[in-house]
């Protein structure tokens, strides 16, 4: 198969894998609790489900390390793991409709863990495949497709899940996620993996010295700061619209869809723009634009104007995510690409984890609008970190 056709297949796979992931995350973040409550399952058990499903995500680092070191079935370093992950998730969702949580809670929990383990596996190794096979100039495009694919999934599948759940057709949700997974499985079969790495890209313990690089350590610091402010802002928008502006919950759902559309466009535009203006300018633009839009969120007076502002917040979210993770691909040493990128993702989760309670405390103490203003300022405080990163980092063609 020609290299151009393989390029199209890989780009399609990256977008589709993240679409599958978006469907999975949409179910667990918004609908799993509703599904379990339809059986009158106690919230204490529902909390256990939410907690244990996080365990496989901790294992992402080890999955990445294994993928960097051990090729499977003479097929490659990434593709077999992606297929295994999709099989685990798809099989779990095909069986879930036949399991009544109140009667077989242990089996339901096991299937949920398998689905989460599957997602952690294909997510981590797809990131590794993208680093292995994507030229530096296309990394912004790849991250744009990934961010856009996940955002599109959250808009489309959330709407479908809402319709299915309202009519009590919960099994349709499980089958929908399974079918999307099967489509991704078939596409993965046709994508070529790297079966034999060049000597300079083979796993080496010496690659771990990359973690001592000062520019990379500052990049990880940025990876804590930006999601702390970005995700905390995103997480409080719905509550602000409902409680701060008196918008009904039904209409808040429409605002959420507008946010998702903005995220899709931010991801799709972010990649090509990064290729055009360079990495440094893209990161600075993402930071400043996100800060300005967050300040706008703090001062917008009416529900009518908020439609545009929520769209812009979504756009900034998608754009910033695309730029940051494309930069993370460049920082990842190809000898330990999946492992290193999983560390980058894990550090980002620390920022999200720190931001959520901080946002709640700020809302309780000073209110929604001052909280948004504070997070807008946090983005600006990251400017010195960005300048220091590019001062210390060796320039590449994309950075110029």
Image (tube, rainbow, N blue to C red):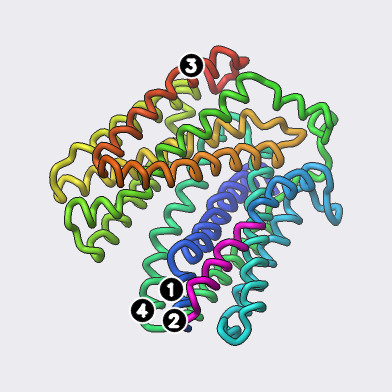
CA separation in Å, label 2 and label 4:
11 Å
Mark 4 or mark 3: which comes first in sequence? 4
Judged from the image, the secondary structure of the residue bearing numbered disc 2 is loop
Q: Nearer the viewer, residue 244 or 390?
A: 244
Q: Label 2, label 3: how many angstroms apart (C-alpha)?
A: 52 Å
Element assignment for label 3: helix
Give the distance between the C-alpha atoms of the residues marked 1 and 2, in whole angstroms.
6 Å
Residues packed near mark 3 inside 10 Å, few (<14), some (14 to 19) or many (20 plus): few
166 vs 234: above or below = below
Residue drawn 59% across the image and 78% down it: 96
Tell me the element at label 4.
Answer: helix
Pick the residue in front: 398 or 254. Answer: 254
Residue 166 got which mark? 4
**Residue at image mark 2:** 38
Task: Calculate the distance from the C-alpha at mark 1 to the C-alpha at mark 3.
Answer: 45 Å
Mark 2 or 4, nearer chain start? 2
Q: Which residue is mark 1?
A: 34
Toward which corner of the image does residue 350 lie, by quadrant?
A: top right
**Numbered disc in front, either 1 or 4:** 1
The count of marks equals 4
Mark 1–mark 2 CB contact (< 8 Å): yes
Q: Which residues are magenta?
A: 40-55
| Sequence-first tag of 1 and 3 | 1
Q: Residue at x 27, y 46 (%)?
A: 310
Q: Which residue is mark 3?
A: 387
């Amino acid at each position: 198969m020609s290299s151009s056709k393989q390029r199209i297949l890989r780009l399609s796979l990256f977008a589709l894998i993240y679409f599958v992931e978006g469907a999975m995350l949409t179910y667990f973040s918004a609908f799993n609790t509703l599904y379990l409550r339809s059986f009158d399952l106690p919230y204490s058990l529902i909390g256990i489900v939410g907690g244990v499903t996080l365990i496989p995500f901790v294992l992402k680092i080890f999955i990445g390390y294994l993928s960097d070191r051990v090729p499977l079935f003479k097929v490659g370093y990434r593709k077999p793991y992606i297929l295994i992950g999709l099989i685990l998730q798809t099989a779990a969702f095909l069986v879930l409709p036949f399991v009544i949580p109140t009667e077989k809670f242990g089996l339901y929990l096991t299937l949920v863990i398998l689905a989460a383990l599957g997602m952690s596996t294909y997510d981590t190794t797809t990131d590794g495949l993208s680093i292995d096979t994507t030229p530096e100039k296309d990394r912004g495009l790849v991250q744009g497709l990934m961010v856009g694919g996940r955002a599109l999934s959250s808009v489309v599948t959330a709407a479908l899940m809402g319709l299915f759940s309202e009519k009590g057709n919960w099994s349709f949700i499980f089958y929908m996620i399974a079918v999307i997974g099967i489509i991704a499985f078939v596409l993965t079969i046709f994508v070529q993996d790297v079966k034999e790495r060049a000597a300079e890209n083979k796993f080496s313990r010496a690659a771990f010295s990359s973690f001592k690089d000062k520019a990379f350590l500052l990049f990880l610091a940025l990876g804590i700061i930006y999601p702390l402010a970005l995700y905390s802002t995103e997480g409080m928008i719905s509550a602000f619209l409902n409680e701060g502006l008196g918008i009904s919950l039904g209409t808040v759902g429409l605002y959420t869809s507008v946010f998702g559309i903005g995220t899709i466009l931010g991801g799709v535009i972010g990649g090509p723009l990064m290729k055009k203006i360079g990495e440094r300018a893209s990161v600075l633009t993402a930071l400043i634009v996100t800060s300005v839009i967050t300040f706008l969120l703090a001062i917008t007076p009416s529900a009518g104007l908020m439609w545009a502002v929520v769209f812009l917040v979504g756009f900034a979210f998608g754009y910033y995510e695309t730029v940051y993770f494309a930069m993370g691909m460049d920082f990842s040493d190809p000898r330990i690409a999946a492992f290193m990128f999983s560390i980058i993702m894990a550090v980002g989760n620390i920022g999200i984890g720190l931001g959520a309670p901080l946002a709640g405390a700020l809302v309780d103490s000073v209110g929604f609008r001052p909280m948004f203003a504070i997070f807008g300022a946090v983005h600006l405080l990251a400017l010195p970190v960005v300048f220091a990163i590019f001062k210390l980092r060796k320039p590449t063609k994309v950075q110029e």
